[in-house]
Image (cartoon, rainbow, N blue to C red):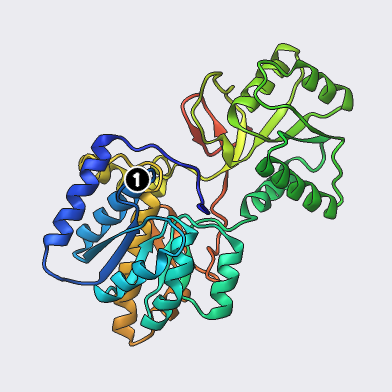
């Protein structure tokens, strides 16, 4: 199953609130822009579907638009039926789409109907290549494949280029491919690591590894591995009095257990938008309605906001909706959003973040 972001948790209060929103929107009279919200309503992915429903439903209700909820099973060959339901409901634009399997079958029919689809999750590069080749109306609010590595390289070249760097990974497919992409890009920029290695994940201690890093002279290390392995490495380096600046990837957004992460460890990751300035007001409004602004909630709210504003602007200007989506910058709770000619996000959504004991936040400016 080709999905994007890692699973997020949502509590029962958030699920209940999303269902209330769905019911209220479905019972209301048709008004404004008709927006399809495609998300799992049952099964193993229902928790993620509830996040999509909560965020999009909140925005659609606030804007006075009309919501059409479509169940997404994420099964192979399920997309055509989803597209048929969207066309039958006369939606003008559809958001959500947790899974690539849905889009693969839906997009040809959505093209014929002139209904753009905005995915908040599917990251497949091949899917977007097929969409562009066939003229399918796919727009991606999720980061594309390769954007995580691109941001990591940007950070390393900006902040670490003058220092001895190590690259280590945990041997998993994701860890290995991410670290190899970083290594190749750095070497193309003339930056060669002083140490590279694959470590065994899930160990209670990594003292031998941090000692090898010290012998290699590394003072900065990128770790392509999960949060707990990074926590173990950071703890053992501190215990051995080995000064290491540590940077991880998006896998760092996980539960802070069993070993807490040391403050100061950094990650290139998607932020928790609710704690950022652009997301605070929307997060407070959601919380006031009993919706936890976590996971896919704010990105889905942003997708529905873009869908509504683009459809209204297109109608007012007498232009195709896709043209408006490509030619507009939208101010949303997840930041300013614009699409490239390739229907991808114009700005890399990954950010450099720092762990402060209770969450990842933008690094503080250095004191003078």
Q: Is residue 307 above or below residue 134?
A: above
Q: Which residue is at 56% across, 68% downward?
A: 128
Instruction: Specify whether residue 364 is in view.
Output: no
Q: Which residue is at 29% across, 52% downward?
A: 53
Q: Is residue 208 above or below residue 123?
A: above
Whole-percent x and y of residue 362? Answer: 53, 39
Q: Which residue is at 31% across, 61% downward?
A: 37
Left/right placement of residue 306 relative to residue 140 reads: left
Which residue reaches farthest top? 239
Number of on-image labels: 1
Q: Nearer the viewer, residue 24 or 38?
A: 38
Whole-percent x and y of residue 352? Answer: 59, 42
Left/right placement of residue 259 relative to residue 110 reads: right
Q: Which residue is at 54% across, 57% downward?
A: 123
Q: Nearer the viewer, residue 2 or 8?
A: 2
Left/right placement of residue 253 relative to residue 219 reads: left
Whole-percent x and y of residue 162? Answer: 82, 40
Question: What kind of element bears circle 1?
Answer: loop
Asked which quadrant contains residue 198, the reply is top right
Asked which quadrant contains residue 32, the reply is bottom left
Q: Is residue 325 above or below residue 208?
A: below
Left/right placement of residue 222 relative to residue 26 reads: right
Whole-percent x and y of residue 217? Answer: 87, 27
Label 1 crowd (10 A; few <14 / some 14-19 / many >=20): few
Instruction: Specify whether residue 207 is in view.
Output: yes
Identify the residue under disc 1. 43
For the C terminus, the quadrant is top right
Q: Nearer the viewer, residue 74 or 293?
A: 74
């Amino acid at each position: 199953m080709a999905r994007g972001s890692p699973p997020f948790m949502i509590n029962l209060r958030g699920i209940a609130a999303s269902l209330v929103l769905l019911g209220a929107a479905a019972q209301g009279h048709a008004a404004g822009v008709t927006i399809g919200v495609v998300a799992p309503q049952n099964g193993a992915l229902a928790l993620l579907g509830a996040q999509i429903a909560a965020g999009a439903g909140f925005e659609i209700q606030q804007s006075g638009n009309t919501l059409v909820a479509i169940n997404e099973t994420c099964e192979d060959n399920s997309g055509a039926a989803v597209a048929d339901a969207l066309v039958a409901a006369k939606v003008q634009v559809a958001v959500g789409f947790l899974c690539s399997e849905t889009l693969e079958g839906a997009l040809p029919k959505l093209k014929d109907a002139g209904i753009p689809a905005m995915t908040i999750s599917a990251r497949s590069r091949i899917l977007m290549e097929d969409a562009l080749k066939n003229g399918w109306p796919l727009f991606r609010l999720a980061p594309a494949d390769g954007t995580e590595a691109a941001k990591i390289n940007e950070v390393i070249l900006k902040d670490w280029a003058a220092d001895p760097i190590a690259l280590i990974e945990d041997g998993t497919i994701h860890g290995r491919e991410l670290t190899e992409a970083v290594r190749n890009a750095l070497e193309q920029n003339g930056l060669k690591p002083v140490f590279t290695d694959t470590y065994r994940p899930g160990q209670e201690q990594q003292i031998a590894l941090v000692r090898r890093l010290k012998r290699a002279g590394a003072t900065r290390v990128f770790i392509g591995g999960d949060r707990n392995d990074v926590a173990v490495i950071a703890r053992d380096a501190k215990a051995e009095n080995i000064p290491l600046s540590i940077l991880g990837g998006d896998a760092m957004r996980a539960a802070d257990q069993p070993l807490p992460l040391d403050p100061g460890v950094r990650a290139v990751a998607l932020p928790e938008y609710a704690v950022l300035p652009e997301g605070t007001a929307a997060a407070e409004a959601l919380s006031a309605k009993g919706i936890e602004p976590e996971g896919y909630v704010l990105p889905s709210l942003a997708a529905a906001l873009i869908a509504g504003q683009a459809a209204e602007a297109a109608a007012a200007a007498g232009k195709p909706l896709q043209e408006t989506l490509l030619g507009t910058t939208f101010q949303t709770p997840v930041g300013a959003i614009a699409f490239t000619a390739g229907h991808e996000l114009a700005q890399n959504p990954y950010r450099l973040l720092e762990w402060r004991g209770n969450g990842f936040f933008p690094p503080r400016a250095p004191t003078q």
